Image (spheres, helix red, strand yellow):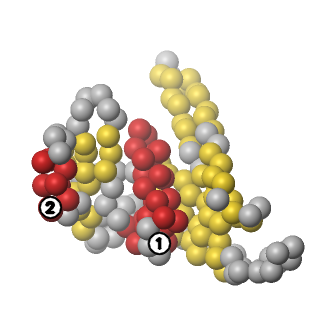
Amino acid sequence: MRITFKILSLSLIYENYLLTITTFPIHVIQNGQLKGVMGASGGLRIVPANIQVYLNHFIHRMDPFESILAPRLYHALVPNILEFEKWDTVSGYHIEVPLEDRVDLAKKGHVLKALAFGAKCQFVVHHLPRWPQGETVVTAKLTGVSDPRKEGEPAGY
């Protein structure tokens, strides 16, 4: 499986402030076919959020919505603090890293800090059927998921 990352950045100067808008879309390609596309908003938490959603779905085999909904951990290395999500979303979901996981992390020496916010991801999965070698996939099912950490829903035509 090949993964491509494309970082797009736009810098603007507005009333003497430098504003930088960065996106981090991820395209997952397998055997030359698109398997999924994801992206996030959330500043320094964009990259770890995208990676955790990728691991949840493609490695741990969670369904697309579970992959997005799972609580996330963030670590910027400096300062040496492991942030974990613990909050209620605007859409009514409670997101929290389980206590037993937090206890295990603390036993390993991590300094933990609860966050009442996090990166918000969008995820589209291309469900490719298994096909004989050399044939081209013409149609396949798409599943779009919008993160319940923000208001919104997937829409497609």
Callout 1 crowding tier (Cα within 10 Å): few <14, some 14–19, many ≥20: few
Residue 116, can we see it?
yes
Left or right position of 16 against 115: right
Looking at the rendered image, the quarter that the C terminus falls into is bottom right
Task: Residue at 56% x, 23% y: name it.
Answer: 13
Res 30 → quadrant:
bottom right
Residue 155, can we see it?
no
Q: Residue 40 at what x, y percent from top left? A: 49, 52
Looking at the rendered image, the quarter that the N terminus falls into is bottom right
Task: Residue at 48% x, 53% y: name it.
Answer: 50
**Sequence-wise first label, 1 or 2:** 1
Is there CB contact under 8 Å for labels 1 and 2?
Answer: no
Which residue in the protein does label 1 denote?
61
Q: Is residue 76 above or below residue 51?
A: above
Task: Residue at 71% x, 80% y: name it.
Answer: 130
Which residue in the protein does label 2 denote?
99
